[in-house]
Image (cartoon, rainbow, N blue to C red):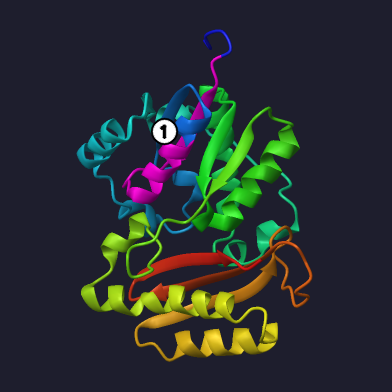
Amino acid sequence: MKLAQQKIALVPTMGALHKGHVSLIDMAKQQADVVVCSIFVNPTQFTDPKDLEKYPRPLEHDMKMLLEAGCDVVFMPSVTEMYPRPETWHIDLGPAEFLLEGEFRRGHYQGVTQIVKKLFDAVNPDVAFFGQKDFQQVLMIKNMVAFFQLPVQIVSCPIIREDDGLAMSSRNIHLSPDDRKNALVLSRALDYVKANFDSIPVAELLAYAQDMIDHTPGVALDYFTVANGETLEPEYDKSHQNIVALVAAKVGETRLIDNMILN
């Protein structure tokens, strides 16, 4: 039960925590009285069972990080707690659900919104913090909140990068040293698009960025797009207020995503 007027923040995670997660907790501490971090590897959002199986679960490491970060409450439910009985879940998340990640991982955002709704019901937060790296996910969660008219404010926090530019991700531990080096092309391509956004037409920027990635060994591009930040449809009109470049690629055996807000 909430104490009088205490503001509760939730930072939902799947564990395997890194500095990106800590930055979410830092922002949550600035904006709320109580910070709850959930750790739950959600089976319904994995479109590949092998991916679920090999998802890292370094619990001791995570607990140490949360303690050092000053998190107040750790919520770590079991699968049977969150899914006590079989259930069907399907809500209208809008046409953006089926673009980009939605095209490559069909049903993924239904699973994401299903678990986030359960976490919100359990924790009853006033505000929840998510990383911008999962740009499309934040959009889908906002659509879910609107769908149920939930009284939760959704805050998107900037991507935290390694010193060489690689976006921090729990999946990075699967990269071999060569993969790790090759993966840098993703942030380099995004940097190039951002640096030249005002001076070069979008179609040329896209061609150059895609070419950069295609010429990097061990990297297989799923998509690189410059999109409207609300609809995720391709955007060529630079006067639009909210434009983002998004990329997804398989580097070795590991699929990585990244993005950069352009204006």
Compared to residue 13, the image places residue 107 above or below, namely below
What residue do we see at 58% from left, 39% from top? 114
Quarter of the figure with the C terminus: bottom right
Magenta run includes residue 13: yes
Q: Nearer the viewer, residue 125 or 199?
A: 199
Q: Position of residue 24 (x, y in %)?
A: 45, 42
Q: Would you say residue 158 is visible in this rendering?
A: yes
What residue do we see at 42% from left, 41% from top? 13
What residue do we see at 58% from left, 31% from top? 127
What residue do we see at 40% from left, 81% from top? 219
Other-residue count near label 1 (Cα within 10 Å), few / some / many at <14 / 14–19 / ≥20: some
- Image side of residue 120 versus residue 28, left or right: right
Compared to residue 41, the image places residue 250 above or below, namely below
- Image side of residue 59 versus residue 72, left or right: left
Magenta run includes residue 222: no
Q: Position of residue 123 (x, y in %)?
A: 51, 23
Q: Nearer the viewer, residue 3 or 99?
A: 3
Task: Please identify the quarter of the rendering in which residue 224 is found.
Answer: bottom right
What kind of residue is marked 1? Ser
Q: Position of residue 141 (x, y in %)?
A: 62, 44
Task: Please identify the quarter of the rendering in which residue 40 is found.
Answer: top left
Task: Please identify the quarter of the rendering in which residue 172 is found.
Answer: bottom left
Q: Which residue is mark 1?
A: 38
Q: Position of residue 23 (x, y in %)?
A: 41, 45
Secondary element at tag 1 = strand
Q: Find the residue positioned furthest to the top.
A: 4
Which residue range is magenta in the image?
Answer: 6-27
